[in-house]
Amino acid sequence: SQTIHQWPATLVQPVGSPLSLECTVEGTSNPNLYWYRQAAGRGLQLLFYSVGIGQISSEVPQNLSASRPQDRQFILSSKKLLLSDSGFYLCAWSTTLGTEAFFGQGTRLTVV
Amino acid sequence: GIQVEQSPPDLILQEGANSTLRCNFSDSVNNLQWFHQNPWGQLINLFYIPSGTKQNGRLSATTVATERYSLLYISSSQTTDSGVYFCAVMDSNYQLIWGAGTKLIIKP
């Protein structure tokens, strides 16, 4: 069966520091991969999605970037964090046929 | 793009009560999912239901794609049902479009 791993679960980082969040999927090939951010008490905002290795689409201009170095690995990065980058980040995957999407446990990022 | 509206935004019920959550969407969609976000933030898949009716224990869902809405029914509510319920639809680009959620509080 397929599983998705996302880490770390929580992270406190100072303003100006770099960021790297990792997400890996097991048990499937060529998944669509997604990074979402959720502000407290609100819905999810799509940040990036990827349909294949090295293929990244960005939905909103921001201080973050994403990379997909391997088929089942998706990384969210920043060179210099801002206070406004704080939030709950969720990685997700779905099949390329657009069926059911599954989410990782999320990373709660606090920038101080 | 597709708009997704959920109602009600907040719902407070006593344990044992039944509830109906609604999701309206503005255009044809490839699929529709219901999620429960627990207090720890984990998004739990409830139903993948682009059309028709499904049941899983005390929960059931119905999607009427031609009329662009879906309903989530929770019967005999328990305190562990508390959390936020999200409806999300997938557009033609395989992107999930989310509603704002319904925050459900079940009081003992």
Image (tube, rainbow, N blue to C red):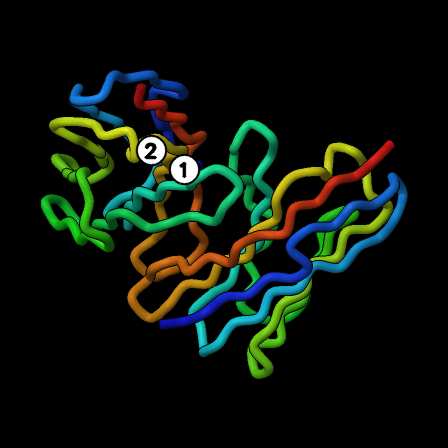
Q: Does residue A69 lie above or below B59 as drawn?
A: above
Q: Residue furthest bottom?
A: B66
Residue receiving disc 2 = A26
For the residues bearing labels 1 and 2, Cβ distance under 8 angstroms: yes
In this view, the residue in front, A106 or A97, is: A106
Q: Residue A2 bears which disc, if any?
A: 1
Secondary structure under tag 1 reads: loop
Residue shown at 15%/35% (left/top)? A70
Mark 1 to mark 2 CA distance (whole Å): 5 Å
Q: Does residue A30 lie above or below A105 as drawn?
A: below
Q: How many marks?
A: 2
**Residue type at mark 1?**
Gln
Q: Residues within 10 Å of mark 2 (few under 14, many from 20)?
A: few
In x, y percent, where is residue B81? 73, 39
Mark 1 or mark 2: whose residue is earlier in sequence: 1
Mark 1, chain letter? A
Residue shown at 36%/35% (left/top)? A89
Mark 2, chain letter? A
The quarter of the displayed image where residue A33 is located: top left
**Residue type at mark 2?**
Glu
Q: Is A76 left, or right, of A88 in this rendering?
A: left
Position of the N terminus of chain B, as image quadrant, is: bottom left
Please tell me if label 1 and label 2 are on a single chain: yes
Q: Is A103 left, or right, of B53 in this rendering?
A: left
Residue shown at 56%/77% (left/top)? B68
In x, y percent, where is residue A4? 38, 33
